[in-house]
Amino acid sequence: MKKSSLENEYLLKINFNDNRPGYASSPYKKNKRGFGWFMKKFFIILIVLALLSTISVGAINFYVIKSTSKYIVQPENAPKSDTMIVLGAGVYPDGTLSPMLSDRVKTANVVSNKNGTEKYILTGDHGRKEYDEVSAMMDRLISKYNVLPENIFLDHAGFSTYESMYRADYIFKVKSAVIVTQKYHLPRAIYIARKKGIDAYGVAADRPESYVGMPKYKFREYFATAKDFVFSLFNFDPTFKGVEHPISGDGTQTHND
């Protein structure tokens, strides 16, 4: 049986295309998977991972803030505890406390006077001889607020909020505490402390006007909360553990650590 001219033309087209790169035994062209194709897929995967990470970080922040909100109280409602915990912040080269840190120390003393908690843990960065947050806080408590030196415990290796709370449990054997820092920082601090088994409450030390650099601090806090959520989940060790100094003892033993 003779093939029609259209059939012959179709068969010629197939035979012609079979010999060209990128074609199989059909007149339909295959997709080429070159470098560009792989880069496109790579960037799509990156975008998906970024979106998933953003959602995860947001969900963690929501959970931490929601689960700790009931433990943030006014100074007059803070329960009497084993100790006040004052978290470190910036100190100027001459030893003067930054406004943020000054407000934390002041608020801690106000709470102490109201609820009868006598002990203080001052925790912050003293990783270099020339930079000492904890001694600067102690000097303020003693000179301005007449706090007894033996009631002040210094945590020289509180390099992060996570490490401060870890060491409050591990070094100082704290069972209950009132944490003093700014409001944006309290949920993370309380969450970590409670994960360590400390019956922790928090009091905000904010002043009416905003602090310099607050948008940066809040942005950093957003990601630090997710980081410390993971650290608490896996119970990572701090930079230093050190010798135990129970909060029931004499705080002067920690002043030269």
Image (cartoon, helix red, strand yellow):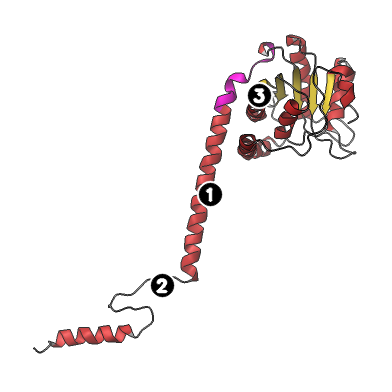
Name the amino acid type tagged 2.
Answer: Lys
68 part of magenta stretch: yes
Q: Which residue is mark 1?
A: 50
User: On screen, 166 above or below 175?
Assistant: below
Left or right: 56 as drawn, with respect to 202: left
In front: mark 2 or mark 3?
3
Q: CA distance from mark 1 to mark 2?
A: 28 Å
Choose the circle earlier in sequence order: 2 or 3.
2
Chain part drawn in magenta: 66-76
Image point (34%, 78%), residue name: 23
Name the amino acid type tagged 1.
Answer: Ala
Residue 6, by quadrant, is bottom left
Crowdedness near tag 1: few (<14), some (14–19) or many (≥20) residues, C-alpha within 10 Å = few
Question: Of the numbered discs in the image, which one, if any, rests on residue 197?
Answer: 3
* Quarter containing the C terminus: top right
User: On screen, 159 above or below 19?
Assistant: above
